[in-house]
């Protein structure tokens, strides 16, 4: 019965579809077979095509913006066009004053770094000598009132500075590792970029020839489909009709199953009801006997604790009365000959008949297929000459040689960059670890010192904790002085390189000043004339060429080729397709009638429709089913009687109660439990029949009507589908050639004969150098400088705080004479006699 709920909507949809058949006959509709599949062509030009790089946004972006802002303040001068021109053309003529004037901000930073390198280690050396003579960093000699406030302030400032150091060193570790991770891939990408650009022009004719060769893909696909066009057309007819025929066959299949299931449930209902009615009287008699016996035992005066069980014994009687349910024998009598037909065999036979349509269509289309194959086998002349029409370039060989030379000469420098980057990474990691060690010393010193101060109130305090805290703080001071020189040297070296890369290269590269500089005559040496090396047209500047290439301009629009080139002229195949369309002819097919519903099955459906199964009084069954077989829980009553038998002092009474409990247990197993099983079976059958009977009657009536209509409509629809699919087939084959034309146009203009890889290489170079390498590089020295200059206040506050952690020689001192007199103890002196 699980299918009957879905039969109604299916039958309604079938009726609606049949009603729309005549409307479809006047309009063209191509089903799934009318849609051309996507052809897979070999992607060309991907060997030199670069994926555009982009730096994803991250949590370090605010730090990068802060560093760039700082560098903008350091380098306020614009791009030094004159200085760079002289440096490139006549390096020996570069004046130091011009370089210093341009690098004024860096010179100021160099002076600050030099002063730091001179002063801080010198002060550290003097402090070390002073400490050796025990004249610096000692201890508080006299305790006074404001000492606690002074100590708290020093500790607070030292803690804040330590936290700032911790933040800076964490950022330094992150940016140092990020720089190391980006430099390696960035350097390794340079040879690949140069290699991909070598064949930008010279490889175009060869790749255009490969485009022309791939015309065989749609050609072979069309020839392949022509080999099976008859079967495919017949399958299309079959496919479009199966949306009507298969649901009807499935409906008949499910309807036959539902008829059998309903009949089985009806027979179970009848047998279960008969069993319950015949076994009802013996059960009533047994329950009455046990109730009388138990009442007499429990009402005995010697029965102890039996009053609570009397109410349960009163309910020891029959609950459900199945003698009140109606009989279904009259309905069974009307269905005694059902099922007369085998619905499964009937549907299988109709399905086999329907599936012969592709074979019949294939036999009637053999002549037209041969004519179409002769036309498709020819290749258009325009496609064959696709590569021959592309003009050559005089700059192609020169460009390839220049890029190959640049690639070979760059490899030693790239290996050197990787080697020095590793040294920088190790030095940065070591110095960042030193700063982290200073932070740890400060935190340990503060913790131990504070612990020692809080323990001074204890008379047994030994000042060991405070002394240990002071030692940790002095260790941090020593590390700060010792490594201040390497800190400032690494910071200035990376700052000078990374800062100039950002301000001199990246800033001018981003606003395209570099392209303007390269395009201005005289700025570059003759050997570095980019317009000549790239073979640009004379009326196109480098910035304009970059912009056009970025927008996907073709090579012949930017480069100076030997002639023009029009790919649309070579991709015009209208003459070729027009000949194929002339071969469209109409097909004819004889649609055999399908015997969807034989007479025996029809009699079964009509017998079920008139059986009256939906008129059975199911609520009467449900009313009795919902009642319990016995009003009291027999098993609980048995347990209760067993407990009562054990609680009796009169052994005879206890034995009788135990026997009654055993008798009730036997009654439950022999009569009540089987009765409950039949009630469950009856409940399932009643619910199944009550839920499906009315709907199944409606589905049977609708199915009889729809089968009759479908037998009339199928030949009409088959003729329309065949006519429609004849045109759809040719349109589908034309779509394969259109796919080729669109793909070839895209390959030629966007992947093969396009200068977009050139602009992509420039953009990738800027992203790799400026965004992926320079940003974390500059952020690293910025964080390291942040920590290095914070070491100065850290040293000062650590030294001052150390004095408060060491033992105090005199615990209290006050300038008040009254307090002095109050606690004054006079000195003992000798008396002269």
Image: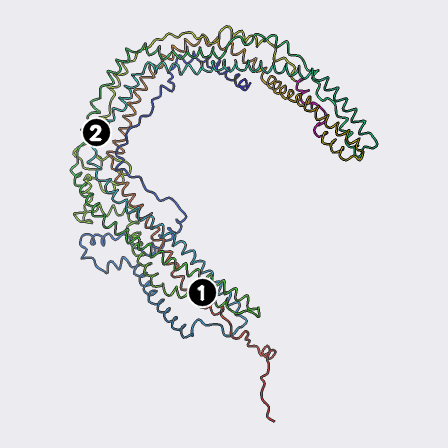
Left of 283 or right of it: where is 751? left
Relative height, residue 541 to residue 10 (above, below): below
* Residue 385 showing in the rendered view: yes
Spot occupied by residue 275 in the image (x, y as percentages of width and height): 66, 16
Q: How is the image coloured?
A: rainbow
Which of the numbered marks, if any, corresponds to residue 472?
Answer: 1
Tell me where residue 282 sits by quadrant.
Answer: top right
Find the residue positioned furthest to the right.
Answer: 301
Relative height, residue 654 to residue 56 (above, below): above
**Local secondary structure at mark 1:** helix
Residue 635 on the magenta span: yes
Mark 2, Cα crowd under 10 Å, few <14 / some 14-19 / many 20+, is some
In-front residue for pair 609/686: 686
State the residue at coordinates (77%, 30%): 655
State the residue at coordinates (35%, 21%): 35
Tell me where residue 162 sits by quadrant.
Answer: bottom left
Spot occupied by residue 524 in the image (x, y as percentages of width and height): 19, 49
In-front residue for pair 728/68: 728
**Reading the chain from its start, which is encountered first: label 2 or label 1?**
2
The magenta segment is 619-637
State the residue at coordinates (25%, 49%): 414
**Local secondary structure at mark 2:** helix
In-front residue for pair 664/43: 664
| Residue of label 2 | 209
The quarter in which the C terminus is drawn is bottom right
């Amino acid at each position: 019965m699980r299918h009957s709920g879905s039969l109604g909507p299916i039958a309604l949809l079938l009726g609606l579809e049949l009603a729309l058949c005549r409307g479809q006959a006047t309009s063209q509709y191509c089903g799934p077979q009318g849609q051309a599949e996507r052809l897979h062509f070999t992607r060309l030009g991907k060997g030199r095509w670069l994926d555009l790089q982009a730096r994803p946004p991250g949590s370090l972006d605010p730090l990068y913006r802060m560093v760039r802002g700082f560098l903008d303040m350091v380098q306020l001068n614009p791009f030094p066009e004159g200085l760079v021109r002289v440096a490139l053309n006549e390096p020996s003529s570069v004046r130091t004053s011009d370089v210093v004037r341009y690098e004024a901000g860096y010179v100021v930073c160099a002076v600050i770094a030099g002063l730091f390198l001179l002063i801080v280690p010198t002060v550290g050396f003097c402090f070390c000598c002073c400490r050796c003579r025990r004249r610096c960093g000692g201890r508080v000699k006299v305790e006074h009132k404001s000492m606690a406030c002074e100590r708290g302030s020093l500790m607070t400032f030292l803690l804040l500075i330590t936290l700032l150091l911790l933040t800076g060193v964490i950022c330094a570790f992150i940016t140092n590792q990020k720089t190391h991770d980006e430099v390696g891939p960035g350097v390794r990408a340079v040879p690949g970029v140069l290699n991909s650009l070598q064949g930008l022009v010279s490889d175009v004719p060869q790749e255009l020839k490969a485009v022309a060769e791939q015309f065989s893909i749609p050609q072979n696909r069309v020839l392949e489909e022509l080999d099976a066009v008859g079967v495919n057309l017949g399958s299309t007819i079959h496919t479009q009709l199966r949306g009507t025929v298969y649901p009807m066959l499935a409906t008949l299949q499910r309807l036959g199953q539902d008829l059998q299931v309903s009949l089985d449930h009806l027979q179970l209902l009848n047998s279960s009801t008969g069993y319950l009615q015949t076994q009802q009287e013996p059960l009533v008699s047994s329950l009455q006997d046990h109730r009388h016996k138990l009442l007499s035992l429990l009402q005995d005066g010697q029965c102890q604790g039996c009053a609570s069980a009397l109410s349960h014994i009163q309910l020891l009687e029959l609950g459900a009365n199945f003698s009140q349910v109606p009989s279904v024998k009259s309905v069974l009598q009307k269905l005694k000959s059902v099922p007369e037909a085998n619905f499964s065999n009937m549907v299988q036979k109709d399905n086999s008949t329907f599936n012969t349509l592709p074979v019949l269509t294939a036999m009637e289309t053999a002549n037209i297929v041969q004519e179409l194959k002769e036309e498709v086998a020819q290749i258009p002349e325009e496609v064959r000459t696709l590569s021959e029409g592309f003009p050559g370039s005089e700059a192609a060989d020169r460009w390839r040689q220049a890029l190959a030379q640049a690639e070979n000469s760059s490899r030693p420098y790239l290996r050197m960059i990787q080697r020095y980057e590793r040294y920088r990474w190790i030095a940065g990691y070591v110095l960042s670890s030193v700063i982290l060690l200073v932070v740890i010393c400060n935190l340990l010193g503060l913790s131990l010192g504070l612990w020692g101060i809080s323990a001074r109130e204890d008379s047994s305090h030994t000042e060991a904790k405070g002394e240990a805290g002071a030692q940790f703080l002095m260790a941090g001071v020593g590390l700060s002085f010792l490594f201040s020189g390497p800190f400032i040297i690494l910071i200035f070296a990376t700052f000078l390189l990374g800062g100039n890369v950002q301000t001199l290269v990246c800033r001018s590269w981003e606003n395209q000043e570099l392209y303007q500089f390269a395009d201005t005559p005289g700025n570059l040496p003759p050997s570095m004339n980019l317009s000549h090396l790239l073979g640009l047209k004379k009326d196109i500047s480098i910035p304009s060429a970059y912009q056009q290439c970025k927008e996907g301009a073709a090579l012949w629009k930017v480069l100076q080729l030997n002639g023009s080139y029009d790919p649309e002229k070579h991709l015009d195949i209208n003459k070729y397709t027009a000949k194929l369309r002339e071969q469209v002819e109409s097909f004819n097919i004889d649609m055999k009638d399908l015997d969807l519903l034989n007479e025996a099955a029809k009699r079964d459906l009509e017998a079920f429709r008139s059986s009256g199964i939906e008129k059975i009084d199911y609520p009467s069954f449900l009313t009795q089913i919902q009642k319990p077989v016995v009003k009291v829980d027999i098993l609980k009553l048995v347990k209760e009687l067993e407990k009562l038998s054990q609680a009796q002092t009169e052994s005879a009474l206890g034995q009788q109660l135990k026997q009654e409990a055993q008798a009730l247990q036997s009654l439950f197993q022999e009569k009540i439990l089987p009765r409950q099983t039949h009630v469950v079976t009856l409940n399932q059958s009643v619910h199944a029949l009550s839920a499906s009977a009315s709907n199944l009657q409606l589905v049977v009536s609708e199915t009889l009507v729809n089968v009759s209509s479908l037998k009339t409509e199928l030949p009409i629809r088959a003729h329309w589908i065949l006519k429609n699919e004849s045109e759809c087939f040719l349109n589908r084959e034309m779509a394969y050639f259109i796919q080729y034309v669109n793909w070839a146009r895209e390959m030629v203009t966007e992947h093969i004969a396009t200068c977009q890889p050139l602009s992509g290489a420039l953009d990738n170079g800027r992203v790799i150098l400026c965004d992926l390498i320079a940003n974390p590089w500059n952020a690293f020295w910025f964080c390291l400088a942040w920590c290095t200059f914070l070491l100065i206040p850290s040293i000062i506050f650590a030294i001052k705080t150390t004095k408060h952690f060491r033992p105090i020689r005199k615990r209290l001192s006050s300038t008040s004479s009254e307090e002095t007199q109050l606690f004054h103890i006079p000195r003992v002196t000798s008396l002269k006699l």
